[in-house]
Amino acid sequence: MKILDQDIDRRDWATLGRKRFREEYLLPLRPVVITGGISHWRASGTWTPDFFRQHYGDRDVTVDDQHLTLTDLLDRIEASSATTPAPYLRNEWLAKWPKQLVADIQPMPQCSLPNWLDSWAFPSRDHPTFIELYIGGAGAKFPNLHFDNWHTHAFLMQLYGEKEYLALAPDQGRFLYPQEGTASNKSGIDDVLDPDLDRFPLFAQAQAIRFTLSPGETLFVPAGWWHTARILTTSITVSINGANTSNWKSFAKDYCGSISAFSRARAALLLVYMNMLGELLELGSWF
C-alpha cells in the first residue's frame, strides 16, 4: 500500500457552508474533515472517560464477547497501549442508551442533513439510520478495512482523543480483496498495516490517504470509500450514516438487493418505489 503525500482537505463549516459542501465534497464524493460542525453539541468538551464513569459506569457492555461494566472497560482503555490494546467498544447503538445521552448530540451537524433515511415515507418502520458510539484506547484498531453497508455515507464526529484513519477511493477496491456475498464491502486482508503480500500481492498497488481526526472535528466518508482507523489516544467518537441525492441510487440498489434473498419480486417492486421516492425527496430537498 502506498500512502499518498496529500493530506485530506480540512474546512471550517462557517466558511464552507451547505452550498459549497454539496458542490465540492458531497456530489463529487470527496472526503473532508470539517471543523466547527459540532460546536453546538452539549457533548463537546463534556464527554470524557470520567463523564461516562460518573453517569454510566455501572452499565453492562459487551465487547468481542466479553461482558464488562463500563467502568471496568474504561479502566482497561486508559491503560491501553499498542502492545496490549484494550477491548474496543464500537458500533454501539445509542438508541439503546438513556435519552438524555442522545440529547447531548442533537441536532446532527448540518453537513449530514438532509438524511433521507429518516424520511416518513421510508418503506420500513426500522429506518436504517444508526447513531453509534465508539470508545477505545491507544493501540486499538477497527477490525477491518471496509466501506459502509448499502453505500451509505459515514459522518464521524470526534469528541475526545485522537484517531488515525486510512481512506481509499472506491476505484482502489480491485486491490483490496473484497469478501464475497453480503460481506463484499469488507476487505479480506487481515492487517492492512502489516499485510501478507504473498497472500494479497495486489494490495501493494493500493493508494491511500492517512490523516488524524481530533476533538471537535467531523469526518465525511463518502459512500463507497474504503476506510479503517486505529486509536492514538483514549478516544470517544460518534457516527451516523446517511443518504440523499448524492448516493440514493446506490443505496436503494444495495438495500433492495439485501431483500432479494428472501423475495426477488418484492425487491424489484421495492426498487421501483425507492427510485420514485428519491425523485420526490429531491423535489422537496434544499439540494
Image (tube, helix red, strand yellow):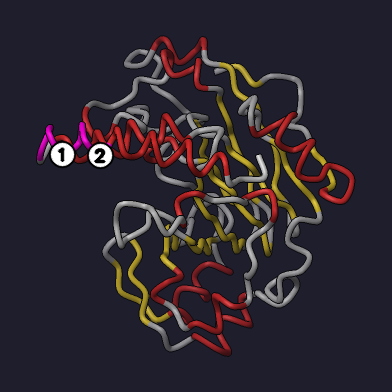
Residue 89 appears left or right of 206 = left
Given contact means CB atoms under 8 Å apart, are the residues at marks 2 and 1 in contact? Answer: yes
Q: Is the magenta stretch mostly helix, strand or loop?
A: helix
Corner quadrant of residue 8: top right
Q: Which residue shows up at 64% across the image and 51% down it?
A: 232
Q: In this view, does 270 lie to the left or right of 102?
A: left
Q: Residues within 10 Å of mark 1 (few under 14, many from 20)?
A: few
Question: Magenta segment range?
Answer: 263-270
Q: Residue 150, position in %: x, y?
A: 37, 38
Residue 90 magenta:
no
**Image mark for residue 270:** 2
In this picture, is 266 found above or below 38?
above
Q: Is residue 20 placed above or below 70 in the rendered structure?
A: above
Element marked by disc 1: helix
- Which of 122/229 is in front? 122
Residue 268 vs residue 217: left or right?
left
Would residue 267 be counted in the magenta stretch? yes
Q: As displayed, is residue 3 above or below residue 93?
A: above
| Measured Cα–Cα span from mark 2 to mark 1 | 6 Å
According to the picture, the residue beneath numbered tag 1 turns out to be 266
